[in-house]
Image: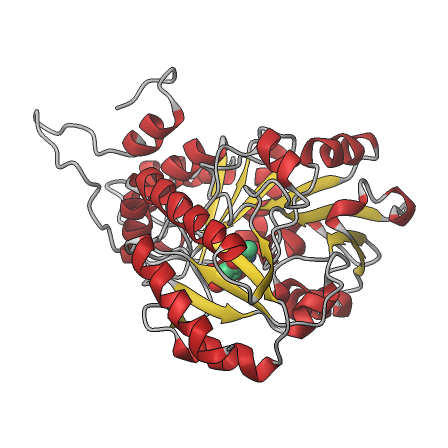
Amino acid sequence: MSGRDDRLQTRVLRAGSPPFDSGAAPVNVPVVRASTVRFERDAERATLHRRREAGEAVSTYGRHGMATHRALEAALGELEGASDVLLAPSGLAAISLVFIALLSPGDHVLVQDSVYGPVRERIEPLLTRLGVSFSYFGASDGVPAALLRPQTRLIYVESPSSFLYEVVDLPALAAFAREHGVLLAADNTWGAGLLYRPLALGADISVQATTKYPGGHSDLMQGAVSTADAKLARRLRDTHDALGLSVGADDAYLALRGLRTLAVRLAQHGRNALEVARFLQTGTRVVARVFHPALPDHSGHALWQRDFTGANGLVSFAFRHAQPADASAFVDALRLFGIGASWGGYESLALIAPSARLREHSYWRGDVPVVRLHIGLEDPADLIDDLSQAFRRVLK
Ligand SMILES: *Cc1c(COP(=O)(O)O)cnc(C)c1O
């Protein structure tokens, strides 16, 4: 097992390792599938039940997860600096859990206007139906003091934001939230816990789509909600249980296996993406603007430098002059990039940013198509060759 003084990567690598049993143990935790949990005696059942009721992550039933789940929660807890981690069947389910657990009829929530699209498309209508009202603020607009109401209970951000990677000043938002008795939750899918640690920067809750980089192989749907606040964990845990959010042991195993190699994969994604970003900036005339927080001309660069330890494989660009049909022809001409949503797997992807999504970002002023690339673990020289030939074929 790892010690408390070990560094983050070491702790993430070791967390949840199976203990020795008669002097030996496998490296990896077994996949423990269960619905019913059997107890040797009723007294043990009662004790475990009491511990669970007191808020401990022990299992009296398969829905709560078994040893595989506990090991994954331990590793994610190290990653996020959290005391409590709740697993969900998708990233979106994890985000919904936060909203449903923390908001009641009459409450108001402040949401960054460049968050993951389904937060607006799906969660806002659901919560509005339940009597919660929403206001949106720009990531670059500082603290949303003018939008605060006596009923505001939660501020929800995603940094860097979807598609254009705007960065919020999380410590400033955390101070503002604390001053007004409002909770602060952050979607940490981009940073995956290794590049960004919202709880350490003052957020109350960090959410991840572990579907993305922790999964890492495009074969898993999963989310996680993390907090270092025991009282908050209790509220989240009760709602998690009420919603019956349950994750299969095989998927818990896959996410844990992905976490063990997260650091090396992210480092390579980051190096490859920066190479591609530099090519897009200088190697072609058809690109007007490149969005990547590690580029010095990016709006969030200074905050990214202050609060993050690296960048991932995402990079977006805006064409200089192009119609939507040109953007479609461009992605169709790519040979190594798949056309697809989601990201965080080992393979490269291209997706035209939906213009309706971009229009919701107060930061976006353009009318040219934007393409989001996820740079995978292929040789970046091949990816650059592929982009070059697609640019040449489409835009003379
Ligand atoms: C993909 C994604 C989600 C949703 O995750 P799913 O597992 O696909 O439901 C949430 N937030 C961000 C930032 C994402 O990129």
> Is residue 212 visible in the rendered structure shown here?
yes
Name the residue nearer the viewer: 249 or 77: 77
The answer to which image quadrant residue 97 occupies is: bottom right
Residue drawn at x 44%, y 36% is: 194
Is 304 displayed left or right of 26 in the figure? right
Say left or right for 45 vs 241.
left
Going by the picture, which residue comes out furthest to the top? 5
Question: How are the colours assigned in the image?
Answer: secondary structure
Observer-nearest of 323 and 283: 283
In the rendered view, tell whether residue 22 sits above or below residue 253: above
Q: Quadrant of residue 322?
A: bottom right
Position of the N terminus, as image quadrant, is top left
Camera-side residue of 37 and 148: 148
x then y, percent, for residue 140: 75, 46
x and y percentages locating residue 43 in the rendered image: 34, 36
Q: Residue at x 46, y 71 (%)?
A: 391
Q: Residue at x 62, y 39 (%)?
A: 301
In-front residue for pair 251/328: 328
One can see residue 83 in this view: no
Rendered location of residue 176, percent (x, y):
80, 34
Q: Quadrant of residue 168?
A: top right
Q: Is residue 342 above or below residue 381?
A: below
Q: Is residue 187 left or right of residue 69?
A: right
Q: How many marks?
A: 0
The residue positioned 34% from the left and 44% from the top of the image is 268
Q: Is residue 333 above or below residue 387?
A: below
Residue 112 image point, x, y percent: 72, 53
